[in-house]
């Protein structure tokens, strides 16, 4: 065999899983379609991520990279501002993290894994997969020159993100329960000089007229930021101008963004992605396991993507280790059920965000400090903390709290 474990994708889930497996003594090969560094969104980490980076011995490399410090999230609606400081959360664990340019962040993780002995082959697209023989998985890749190569390993981990390689090849994809939405985004030189602006927090702003439309403003340490808007699919079709012009126009419709970005330089073309919410029939099968966005992606509103990706790696690696050592593994209970428990918490809050219930809760002036701390834990990524009452029967609790909050 070429390796003990083949990993599809060198993004955060793939690099962290590879590093963890390498620490356990396994031969790991990553097959990555792109050449790093490459652009990606999903730039605002949650504090829960820090524990997984620490577990993989990658935290120091990330800390040394000079990313923007992050300690919370701010929300804006029609001139009203509310903030959550992650250090004041209910759950134990990290209360701070970073806001990162993904091209640099992903490169740091991949380079750290490679320096530890993980082999990474860039420009390798996976075109076929065969799991018919137990304990002998096969992948077929095509490199930048069109040359095909077959790879074999005892196990394959799919960390291909939105590429969703194995779900497509094995016909595992199922429709998402979330309505289709689209995001329009870019990086700008922000030139923010407003006195009451906190660069240590992501800003999530809500359109003053259409509350299902929201914006992100993620500051970086170099005076630039990521700016994006999320709308229902097709909402922007009637807007005139280039994507960057449309994004700028949309941003200045929100009062807080108009104030902050009055001197900003919109110097980078805007990109768009749509229909990103996805689900699968199963997160594992004979000889493979799906990590992060390759399995399921909800929505970018609470920046949960990388947290779910790293959680999936942290859950899957010990199970792969046990399986390769000939021990029994209950993938359904120990991986699928365990991972989905937190995903379903995030899902409840995403759904409540778009129907307005969660927006009512976060802008409630008289919110009990104890409830705010529990919600703060969810926003910080601790969706798997079963000690937090707001992760248990969370849809019902969101409903009950929203019912006593005044309308926005």
Image (cartoon, rainbow, N blue to C red):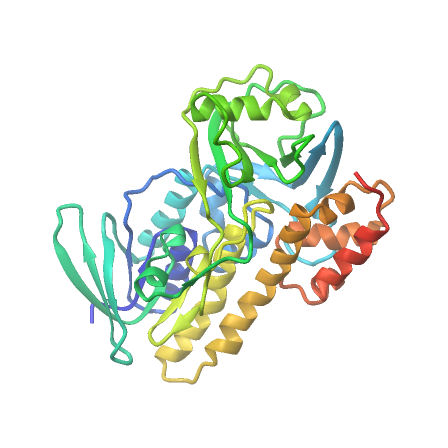
- Which part of the image, by quadrant, shows the N terminus? bottom left
Q: Quadrant of residue 138?
A: bottom left
Task: Identify which residue, 33 or 27, lies in the foreground.
Answer: 33
Q: Position of residue 188 (x, y in %)?
A: 49, 24
Residue at left offset 49%, top offset 77%: 332
Instruction: Tell me: residue 354, above or below residue 266.
Output: below
Q: Is residue 83 above or below residue 255?
A: below
Q: Is residue 378 left or right of residue 360?
A: left
**Residue at 55% across / 66% down in the picture?**
340
Q: Is residue 380 left or right of residue 38?
A: right
Residue at x-position 51% and y-position 51%: 305
In the rendered picture of this protein, how many numbered marks are placed on residues? 0
At x 54%, y 49%, the residue is 299
- From where the camera sits, is residue 106 visible? yes
Q: Position of residue 388 (x, y in %)?
A: 73, 62
User: What x and y, as percent, mark residue 123?
Assistant: 23, 47
Q: Position of residue 122 (x, y in %)?
A: 25, 49
């Amino acid at each position: 065999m070429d390796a003990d474990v083949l990993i599809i994708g060198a993004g955060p889930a793939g690099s962290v899983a590879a590093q963890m497996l390498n620490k356990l003594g396994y031969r790991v090969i990553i097959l990555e379609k792109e050449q790093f560094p490459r652009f990606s969104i999903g730039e605002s980490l949650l504090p829960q991520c820090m524990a997984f980076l620490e577990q993989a011995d990658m935290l120091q490399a990330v800390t040394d990279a000079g990313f923007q410090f992050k300690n919370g999230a701010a929300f804006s609606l029609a001139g009203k501002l509310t903030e959550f400081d992650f250090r004041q959360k209910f759950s134990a664990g990290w209360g701070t993290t970073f806001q990162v340019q993904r091209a640099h962040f992903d490169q740091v993780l991949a380079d750290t894994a490679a320096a530890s002995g993980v082999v990474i082959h860039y420009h390798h697209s996976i075109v076929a997969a065969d799991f018919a023989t137990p304990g002998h998985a096969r992948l077929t890749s095509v490199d930048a020159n069109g040359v095909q190569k077959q790879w074999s390993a005892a196990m394959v981990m799919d960390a291909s993100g939105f590429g969703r390689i194995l779900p497509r090849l094995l016909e595992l994809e199922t429709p998402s329960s979330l309505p289709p939405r689209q995001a329009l985004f870019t990086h700008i030189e922000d030139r923010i000089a407003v006195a009451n602006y906190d660069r240590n927090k992501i800003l999530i702003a809500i359109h003053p007229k259409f509350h299902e439309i929201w914006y992100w403003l993620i500051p970086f340490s170099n005076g630039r930021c990521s700016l994006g808007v999320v709308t229902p699919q097709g909402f922007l079709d009637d807007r005139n101008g280039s994507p960057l012009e449309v994004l700028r126009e949309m941003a200045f419709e929100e009062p807080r963004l108009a104030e902050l970005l009055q001197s900003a330089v919109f110097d980078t073309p805007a990109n768009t992605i749509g229909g990103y919410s996805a689900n699968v029939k199963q997160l594992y099968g004979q000889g493979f396991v799906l990590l992060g966005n390759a399995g399921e992606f909800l929505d970018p509103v609470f920046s949960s993507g990388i947290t779910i990706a790293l959680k999936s790696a942290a859950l899957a690696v010990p199970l792969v280790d046990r399986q390769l050592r000939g021990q029994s593994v209950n993938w359904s209970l120990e991986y699928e059920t365990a991972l989905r428990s937190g995903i379903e918490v995030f899902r409840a809050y995403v759904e409540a965000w778009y129907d307005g219930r969660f927006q009512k809760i976060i802008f409630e002036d008289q919110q009990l400090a104890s409830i705010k701390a529990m919600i703060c834990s969810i926003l910080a990524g601790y969706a798997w903390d079963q000690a937090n009452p707001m992760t248990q029967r969370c849809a019902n609790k969101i409903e009950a709290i929203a019912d006593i909050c005044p309308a926005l």
